[in-house]
Image (cartoon, helix red, strand yellow):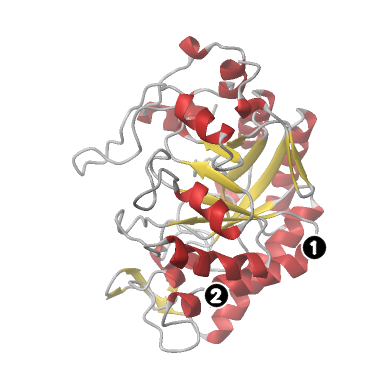
Amino acid sequence: MNNNPLFSPIKLGKLELANRIAMAPMTRSFSTGNVPNDLVVEYYRRRAAGGVGLIITEGTCVGHKAASGYPDVPMIAGDKALTGWKKVVDAVHAEGGKIAPQLWHVGAIRQPGIEPGGDTPGYGPSGMAMPGKVTGHTMTQQDIDEIVAAFAQAAKDAKAIGFDAVEIHGAHGYLIDQFFWPETNQRDDAYGGDLAARSRFAIEVIKATRAAVGEDFPIIFRWSQWKQQDYTARLVETPEELKAFLTPLVDAGVDIFHCSTRRFWEPEFADSSLNLAGWSKKVSGVPTITVGSVGLDADFLPIDGSLQFRSAAPASLDNITERLINNEFDLVAVGRALIANPEWANQVQDGLTDSLRPYSEACLKELV
């Protein structure tokens, strides 16, 4: 396995990585009081020791009163949370890994009562958590400016405590994606209309983040076609539309696109085998990260609409390595397989794939 392209080093601007394996961001909800604790420190340290080149943390909420939507998710604001994250960063660096926080605002899906935030409702471009149903607060210009500033401050703080990059969460039907998606953005001002106008909020976030961290600090932007509100949703239908969408984001300061799909092997457009990361790299000219059931034989969708998520057994990596050899993308993000196997990267590199554990819902009940 020593010739496996997954384990070749790469330099992406100032980001130098030992291999092409990234840990995908996955909400775990073990940060009591919204502060990363010793359990969280050890969780990330083990993945760095297990051979992951770049850890992208679970979504960590920026310093805005409506940013959080789930109990016990970490913040990246306030002295206690930043001190907790500094311990995580130091532990990962001690194992030779690199780490980036995912900066997150959940938007209109928030329900009052989640801490921090108390009775604050969800904030969104049109107050819609679901298409056509106003359940929260429609953002004013002042709200927009405050949240843009919160992303920038979170990025500045992340750099100050030693993170190696930041990832802005622009996917999966959360706040930035609620602006992108016409079903949840019904605004008639400069932030609504066609996709170029609906991208204005994201562009302002990226520009403010770039100004906060300087020219050389890597900014990753995660985006998706699918939404948690609608797995079939699509922002763009052609490579030409994709280029028109991504180019302004690059101009604003994005260095790397993290292209979220449920199944990495599926082609994004007709008449080509390229997936979303492959097309995004081709049309934008910047590096990309692919993700979506890597190393597993089933995606994460619930079975028959129930709350029981799919179990998944280890699967061949031949397809992903072939695409990496073809330079379709630059990094490969691994999610659930790394929850089940903290040493997944080292096991794969050492040819010990027979020892990999399957993923199941039981894996989510503890942080190991």
The image quadrant where one finds the C terminus is: top right
| Quadrant position of the N terminus in the picture | top right
Closer to the camera, 271 or 357? 271
Q: What residue type is labelled 1?
A: Glu
Secondary structure beneath disc 1? loop
Judging depth in this view, the residue of 107 and 171 nearest the camera is: 171
Q: Residue furthest bottom?
A: 189
Q: Which of 82 and 336 is in front in this view?
A: 336
Q: Position of residue 320 (x, y in %)?
A: 49, 31
Residue drawn at (61%, 80%) of the image: 145
Report helix, strand or loop for mark 2.
Answer: helix
Q: In which quarter of the image is residue 209?
A: bottom right
N-terminal-most mark, 1 or 2: 2
Residue topped by disc 1: 215
Q: Mark 2 points at which residue?
A: 201
Q: How far apart are marks 1 and 2 (CA)?
A: 20 Å
Residue in the image at 47% along x and 24% along y: 318
Task: Between label 1 and label 2, give the one nearer the viewer.
Answer: 1
